[in-house]
Amino acid sequence: MSLKLLDITREIGIVTYDYPFGDYEVHEGFRGKPHYEYEKCIGCAACAIACPPNAINVSYLKDEDKSKWEFDCGRCIFCARCEEVCPTGAIYLTKEFENSVRFNKEDLLQIGELEVVRCRVCNKPFTTKRLINYVIERLEKTRVVMNEEKIELLHTCPECKKNQAVEQFTKSVRYGGFK
Amino acid sequence: MAKGEKFINKLKEKVKVLDVSYSTPDQVVVLVPRSDLVEAVRMLYYDMGGWLVSMIANDEREMNGHYALYYILSMEGGKMTIEDELPQDEKCFITIKTLIPETDPTYPSVTTKVPAAVWYEREAYDMFGLVAEGLPDKRRLVLPDDWPDNLHPLRKDAMDYRFRPDPVAPEDEPDYPFLFPEGDGVVDVPWGPLHITSDEPGHFRLFVDGETIIDADYRLYYQHRGMEKLAENRMNYDQMGFLAERVCGICGFNHAIACIEAVERASNIPVPRRAQFIRVICLELERLHSHLLNMGLACEVTGNVTAFMHLFRIREYTMELAQLITGGRKTYGNVMVGGVRRDITATEIKEAKVLLNKVEKYLKEAWEAIMEDDDQVERWRGVGRLDPKVARDFSPVGPNMRGSGFKRDTRYDHPFDVFDEIKFEVAVEYGCDVLSREKVRYKEVMEAISIIRQCFELMSGGPIFIKPDEYLIKPGNFALGNTEAPRGENIHWVMQGSAQKVYRWRCRAATYNNWPSLRFQFRGNDISDAALIVCSLDPCYSCTERITVVDVKTGKTKIITEKELKEYAKTRKNSPLKK
Ligand code: SF4
Ligand code: SF4
C-alpha cells in the first residue's frame, strides 16, 4: 500500500460527521419532507394535480361532509411542485430528511379533513367551505360587490351551472328574447 | 449543403432512398425499403464512419398501417486513428427508417453485418414481435422467461399497461438457454441472479478453464420496469421527465435531460440560455460524484480499502455541492420541458467554488498517491481488454470506449446546450484496460471541475424557464436527445402523441451499448478479475451475492459465497475453485 496515502490520512484527520449522534446541517434551500399546514389549506387540490408521483390526493368522500387531503411521504420525490402551486402556502418543503418510519407505514401520511359545501341545486358535495371563503375574499379585494346572486352562483356545482346556462339559453330562444 | 446530404448522396448509389426529412437541422431521417435496410445501415456504419446509437421499433399502424424501425447512426468517423474522424461541421445523426407491413412482421437482420444491433433486434422481437430474419441470437432479452409467448407489450393493441400475466410454477418455467462453449474441462460458473450491491441484478455465467475465463454469457433485465409503456399510457410530459430521472440512481439527471431535450427538439422549443448553463452544471456534477464512486470501487474490489475511503471522502464534497446547488444530494426534480425549475444564487456560486477547489486539490493529491502504488496499478493493467476492433463493431460508449483510444464523446461530437461554447478536452487513453478506463475517469473529473467553473463565469442572467403557452407540441413529431452520462452516452427518443402524452418513448442507457462487447472483455482473464472488469464498465456492479460453480464433467455443483469471492478478488490467495 502506498505510504503517501497514509500520510494524507494523518494530515486530514477525522472527516466523518457525528451524525446520527450529532447534528447534520443541510444547506439553505434543501428540499426535505413537505410540511402541511392544515390551517392554511383551502382544499383546492392544485397540489394534487401538480404532484408528479401522485403523492397527494384530494378526495370527496361520498355522502360525507368532509373532503380528505392526504399526503403519502413514501411516494414523494421532493420536487417541490406542490409548494410552487399552492395559493396559500399551506404546503412547503422543510429541511427534514429523516423520513424512515418503524413498522407503521401510516406514519408516512399527513391527512387533513375539510368541510365540504354541497351544491344548492343537486346537493352533491363539490367544493370546500374554505375555498369558497377564499374566493369571496379575493373577489372583495378587487372591489367586486358580492350580492345574493353571486353567492348563489358560487354555491352551484359546475355541472348544475352548465345545465342552468343551457336552460336559460333555450328559454330565451323559446320566448324570442335572445339578443 | 444541408447536413448529412453528402452521406445520403453516397447512399443513393447503392440503396433506394424513398424519402429524406429533418427532425432537427442535424437529425436526418432517411426512409429506405425493407430490402435495403441492411445495406443502408452497413454503409453508414462501416463505409462512412457511423456508430449505432439506438434502434427504435414503433407501432405506427394507426398512423400509416405499418410497424417502423429507426436505426440511428451517429456520423462522426471510424476513429480507429486520429485522422479517421469527420470534420465537426459534417457530424450529424442519420436515422435509417423502414416500414414493416402488419401482415408480414419480419425484416432482414442488420446484426449479420453490424454486430452492434444485436440487443436492439432481440428487444424489437420481445416488445413488438418483429422478427429479424437471420439474427444469430434470437433469445429473449427483456421479457421474463415465463412471459406469454405471443404477447408483445409495446404493440398498441396488446395489453393494458397494468396487466400482469399470472406467475408460472417453477417447474413450468421455461429454461433460459445460456450459451455454452465446447471443450474439455470447461467449468460453468453461474454468477447471480441474486442481489448485487447496487441497483441492478444480473445473472452472469463465466466459463472457465482452470482459473481462466474463456467466455461469458449474461442475462439481465430482472428488474425491467416497463417505463416506456407507463409513460405512453398515463404520464404527461412533466411527469415523464421525473420518471426518466428514475432510470438510474446515479446518473438520473442525464436521463431526464436527454428525455426532456428530445421533446424540446421535436417541438423546437427554445430553452433559455441560463437554463442551459444550469443543466450543464448539474450534468457535470453528476459526473463528479459518479466517477469518484467508480474509482473508489475499482480500488475496493482489489482490496485497496484505504484508497477507497479517500476517494469517498472526496466524493462527499461533490455530494454537498449537489445539495448546495439543487437542494438535494441528488440533482433530481429540477428539469422540465422549457427549462429548469431552480435558479442558482450568487452566494451559492461562491460557496460552490470553494467546494470545487477542495475536490480538485484533494483528488489530485490522492490520485497521485494511488498511481505511485505499484500493487494497485498492476492489478488494473492489462485486465479486461476492450480490443479496438471489437469496439468498432459493437459501438460501446463512455470511459469504456475512450480507454481504448477512441475519441468518442457526445458532448464533443454532437454538442448540446452550451457545450459548443465551453472548452474541454476529451479524455482518451490507449491501454484498452481497466487502468486506462480509470485514468480516463480521473481526467474527466478534472475536466468537469473546469467545465463547471466556466459555466459560473459565462452564465448570464435571464429567465430559466419558458412557459408552456409559449410553445406547441405537435403530434407525430419525433427527435432524439443525447447526453454524455458518466458511463457514456444516453439516448432518448421521443415521438409525440396527442393530448399531452408521448406516442413512443425509447430510453437507451449508456450501459446497454456496453454489455454486448463485455463478453470479449472477460476472455482470457483470471476469475479473480471478473468483478473488477464488470466494475470498470461502471454499471454499478461490484460484487455478487454468491457464485455457483458447476463442473461440467462430473456435474458437481459448488456454492461459493460472496465473501469467499470478494476475499479472493482482494487477496488472490486460496482460490475458492480449488477448495
Ligand atoms: S414535493 Fe413533489 S412529490 Fe412531494 S408532494 Fe410535493 S409535488 Fe408531490
Ligand atoms: S391549499 Fe395548497 S395544500 Fe391545500 S389543496 Fe390547495 S394547493 Fe394543496
Image (cartoon, coloured by chain):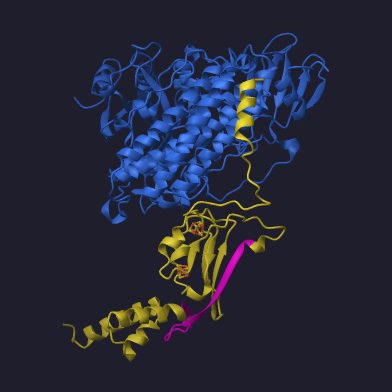
Chain colours: A yellow, B blue
Residue B183 spot, x, y in % from top left: 70, 9
Q: Is residue A15 above or below residue B440?
A: below
| In front of the other: B147 or A95 | A95
Question: Which quadrant would the N terminus of chain B be assigned to in this image?
Answer: top left
Magenta segment: A108-128
- The verdict on residue A145 being magenta is no
Residue B216 spot, x, y in % from top left: 64, 19
Q: Tell me if I can see residue B129 in this picture.
A: no
| In front of the other: B380 or B456 | B456
Q: Is residue B142 above or below residue B553?
A: below
Q: Residue furthest left?
A: A179
Q: Is residue B579 left or right of residue B154?
A: right
Q: Residue furthest bottom?
A: A148
Q: Residue at x 42, y 86 (%)?
A: A120
Provide the major secondary structure of the magenta segment: strand
Question: Which quadrant would the C terminus of chain B be assigned to in this image?
Answer: top right
Q: Residue at x 33, y 34 (%)?
A: B416
Q: Is residue B279 above or below residue B441?
A: below
| In front of the other: B274 or A72 | B274
User: Residue A84's quadrant in the figure?
Assistant: bottom left
Residue B541 spot, x, y in % from top left: 62, 31
Q: Residue at x 60, y 28 (%)?
A: A8
Q: Residue furthest top?
A: B184
Q: Tell me if I can see residue B364 in this picture.
A: yes
